[in-house]
Image (cartoon, rainbow, N blue to C red):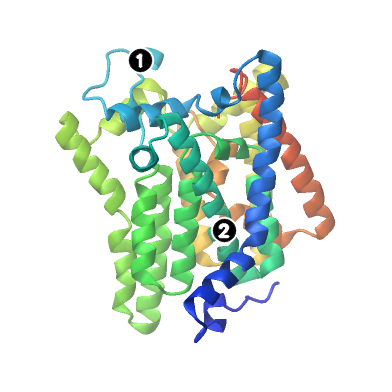
Amino acid sequence: MQTPAPSMTTTLVGVPRREVLRTLVVASAPALAIFVASRLVVLAVMGIVARVHHHAVGHYFTRWDSHWYIQIARQGYAHAIPHGHGNAAQVNLGFFPLLPLLIRVVHWVTRLSFPASGEALTLVAGATAAVTMWWMVRDHYGEKIASRATALVFFSPAAVVFSFVYSEGLIIALASMTLLALHRRRWILAGIAAALATACDPVASAIVVPCAVAAYTAWRGERDLRAWWAPALAPVGIGVFFVYLWIHTGSPLSWYLAQRAGWQAGPMGTGIFYAIYRLFAHGIFDLNSLAKTAALLATVATVVIWRRVRPPLTWGVYAGAVLVFGVLSPIVGISPRLLLRGFPLFAIVAAGVSRQRFVVIVTLSALAMCVLAVASTTIAWTP
């Protein structure tokens, strides 16, 4: 078991602020290097595809869900859900507001187009996610494991989405900031970061659970009432969004209804079984079902490692809450993209395997990322 690393902030007391900032940037260099390397790999792969098909490479980075986020940033939310089901009923009410709101801000400040603003924002968010996650893991396992964990996340099979106008970068940045703040007992900062995370995506509301667990632990052990700020603030983001929907559309459940009508049809809790069934029915050529089944098996293996490395309780309950969303979904199941939201799982693997196994895992993962990046330019894999 790794010895917890001392907090960098405790070693910089009394140091001038400019020197502190320089030291933190230098210390974060491994995380930034990993992020940049992963994005260059994705850019190279997508560049080859774009050249073959005679498209601009940016064409592939603003498709799929990116379209909806950019539409919200440009036009705002629709007022109603169209009649019908499936494609005919798809509407931007099925997406959360923080990413499009920030895209609009970037557009207003820089005067870049909305797609370019979205790309710029998500790349900055991804870099921030790499740094905050690295520091989160470093606090518990040290720098070597922090770098391994960051590499596993940003070279993971679904990591191409960090180059799309998607919310994963924001979610990991804010959730890891929350978990780091909880560990350092910065309760209000944890609550604010968690509140912003819950405005990114419904799955990100899993961050409320570790806030509540950490607060209860601090209160039971030390009667620290300030700890309750974290779970009190955490649901504010999703709460404000649902109140806005109530005013804007007449129903606070418009997001849920839009998802059920346009994307998440079917009985709840059947996503995992549906993916396994399709894999047996159609074989490995059904790439979506293959990827989800492989992600499920990887999750089971991670749980086995989990018992050996004993990560912080807050990591475990957060990752577990994320997985519950996948289990309950009628479509998503345990997908590679869902596992990115449960990113502490990657840190557990990084801490629990030998160097040789880590090299094998990250190499296979990077290859899978390249395959899914290419598949995302077709309808073979839905990112």
266 to 188, vertically: above or below: above
Q: Earlier in the sequence, mark 2 or mark 1?
A: 1
Up/down of 361 relative to 22, above or below: above
Q: Is residue 296 left or right of residue 110?
A: right
Residue 340 horizontal/vertical position (percent)? 56, 45
Q: Is residue 298 above or below residue 347?
A: above
Quarter residue 40 falls in: top right
User: Residue at 30% across / 50% down in the picture?
Assistant: 237
Give the residue at mark 1. Answer: 85
Please state which amino acid type lies under the numbered disc 1. Answer: His
> Which is closer to the viewer, label 2 or label 1?
2
- Percent of width and height locating residue 265: 40, 23
Quadrant where the image shows the N terminus: bottom right
Amino acid identity at mark 2: Val
**Front residue (pair 379, 252):** 379
Q: Is residue 271 left or right of residue 364?
A: left
Q: Residues within 10 Å of mark 1 (few under 14, many from 20)?
A: some
Residue pointed to by mark 2? 131
